[in-house]
Amino acid sequence: MPNQTNTRKKIIHLSSVHRDHDVRIFLKECRSLAKLFPEYEVHLILTGVQERMEDLVQIHTVPKVEGSRLKRMWTTVNHVYRKALELNGDVYHLHDPELMRIALLLKRKGKKVIYDAHEDLPRQILGKSYVPMRKVVSWVMERVEDFVCSRLSGIVTATPHIANRFRRIHSNTIDINNFPLETEIEFISSKEMKKENSVCFIGGISPIRGTQELVDAMALTDCHLELAGEISVDFKNQLVKSKGWTNVRELGFIDRKTSMELKQKSIAGVVTFLPYPNHVNAQPNKIFEYMAAGLPVIGSNFQMWRELLVENNCGICVDPSNPKEISDAITYLKNHPDEAKLMGENGKKLVHEKYNWNVEELKLASFYRTILG
């Protein structure tokens, strides 16, 4: 029997920096596209992972480059680009700013190219104190992003705020929010949850995310902080000097199952990012994951977060730079368990009805139908 040529078209997602099983890229976008567009092959290029087929997504690997940041960025992107050309896709979906330098190269080869803005890059740069001349770098990167993205097939963003920025330069822009998957919405009766005397923070740990102030707050309360995430050696050396560190349980990086168990037993989930430009209009996924688990949220007093948490009575907003306000919120929820329970139930209901991936998946499908024609 003669060999039959595979004529299925290909959607290819690319990342040079994200982890295997990244929530937004693989668990949400790639798996949804593979399910919703069975006539297309869905591929994902990552660095240093095991090649395999998983949940109808073909995962490819390129070498993980060690060394300086610039070396990694340049060489890894070159590897990703070569693999992308080898796969000969029809649609390329790029997930990292450093991939912008290959976006127009792919477009010139007649490919449809999508840029996925996970963050507001120019505002993110303004919050990085280690970047020299960061105001100039931020200004330049915004012009570069605008120049490249205005020439692509479409833009996907992680929040409505970022989408509003890109709509100025591209009409085919959509916000696909990082709302929880159905499997992350834990509809377990609050009566079955055995609460411990602790609050939790799960995610990236850094000075600009208010970790120092949160640890300092723990010296002012008799609760414990379950701190889950990777901490750099230098920053940890700074944190352990705080009086509040004695009330911190450092957990390191935890898997999703452990994360769910941690949320189940906590009094509240904490997201007290400092008011850097990239934070005040952000929608951290952990807020919605806390809500999905039935946890009241202690969040920063940004306007967008107040509208979500306070106006819907599913959390408390505080000044993230004020450890006393953070500790007072923790103590209040501990001493008012009925009110904390009501806030958790309100948050869970909102996620079930509105802030979930099923809603965003339909938006992603509609966007791709426009791209695919």
Image: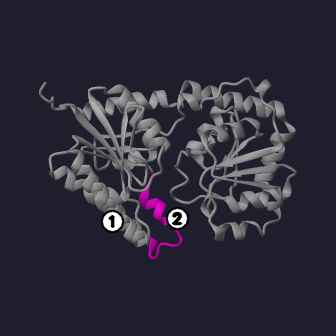
| 150, above or below 21, in the image | below
Q: Is residue 304 left or right of residue 267?
A: left
Residue ID at (56%, 46%): 284
Question: Where is residue 182 shown, x and y percent of the image?
Answer: 54, 28
> Magenta region: which residues?
119-134
Residue nearest the observer in this picture, 138 or 50: 50
The kind of residue tagged 2 is Gly
- Which element is circle 1 on? helix
Q: Is residue 248 left or right of residue 75?
A: right
Residue ID at (14%, 30%): 3
Residue nearest the observer in this picture, 320 or 92: 92
* Mark 1 lies on residue: 75
* Mark 2 lies on residue: 127
Question: Where is residue 318 shown, x and y percent of the image?
Answer: 71, 50
| 291, above or below 109, in the image | above
Residue sitting at the far front: 1
Q: Where is residue 189, by image quadrant? A: top right
Question: Where is residue 140 shown, x and y percent of the image?
Answer: 34, 67
Which tag, 2 or 1, sits closer to the chain's start?
1
Q: Nearer the viewer, mark 2 or mark 1?
A: 1
Q: The C terminus appears in which quarter of the rendering?
A: top left
| 171, above or below 98, in the image | above
Residue ID at (80%, 45%): 198
The kind of residue tagged 1 is Thr
Residue nearest the observer in this picture, 354 or 203: 203
